Every structure is written in C-alpha cells, then in structure tokens.
Amino acid sequence: MSIHLLKTVLLWCLTFNYGILLLWVALLAVARDSFYRLNSRLFGVSRQVFDAANYGGIVGFKLLIIFFNLVPYVALALTS
C-alpha cells in the first residue's frame, strides 16, 4: 500500500467518523428528550446517567478519532 493511498484512506475515515460524531451531537441537541424517554424505558436510566453516558461517549469517540485517524494522517502528511 502506497503512502498516498494510505493518506487518502485515513482522510476518508476521518471525514466519515467526524460525520458520525456530528450526527450524534446534532441528534442529541435536537431530540434529546425523545432519546432519553426511549432509553429510560429500555434501560431505566436517570437523566444524569443518560447525559453522562452520552457526554462520555462523545468525548471517547472524539479522542479515538483523533488518535487513530488524525494523528496518523498528520504524521504521513509531514513525512511525505
């Protein structure tokens, strides 16, 4: 696999993953109460647990995107 192809794949992965992240944040901003009602019926979670789980998930997903997509892409861009 060439470096150019690897950079292209990493850039597409970065774009796709940030799209998922932005969709998650947008859905929570627009329909937070609907998602909370669904999850409280299914799992019996409180509002605080629901908010903490989503915030932790968003932060964790963003860190994984940065660590596995952005950092390798920048490293390859700087070396080539």
Image (cartoon, rainbow, N blue to C red):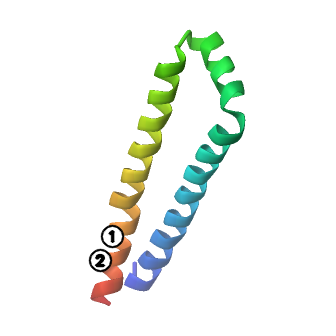
22 vs 28: above or below: below
74 vs 65: above or below: below
Q: What is the quadrant of residue 25 in the picture?
A: top right
Q: What is the quadrant of residue 37 in the picture?
A: top right
Question: Which mark is drawn over residue 75?
Answer: 2
Question: Which mark is drawn over residue 15?
Answer: none
25 vs 4: above or below: above
Quarter of the image where the N terminus is located: bottom left
Residue 3 position, x and y percent, is 38, 83
Q: Amino acid at mark 2?
A: Ala
Q: For numbered disc 2, what is the local secondary structure?
A: helix
Residue 49 position, x and y percent, is 46, 20
Q: Amino acid at mark 1?
A: Pro
Residue 41 position, x and y percent, is 65, 11
User: In the rendered view, does 13 fall on the left or right side of 27?
Assistant: left
Quarter of the image where the C terminus is located: bottom left
- Real-space Cα separation, disc 2 to disc 1, in angstroms: 5 Å
Q: Residue at x 56, y 12 (%)?
A: 43
Question: Which mark is drawn over residue 72?
Answer: 1
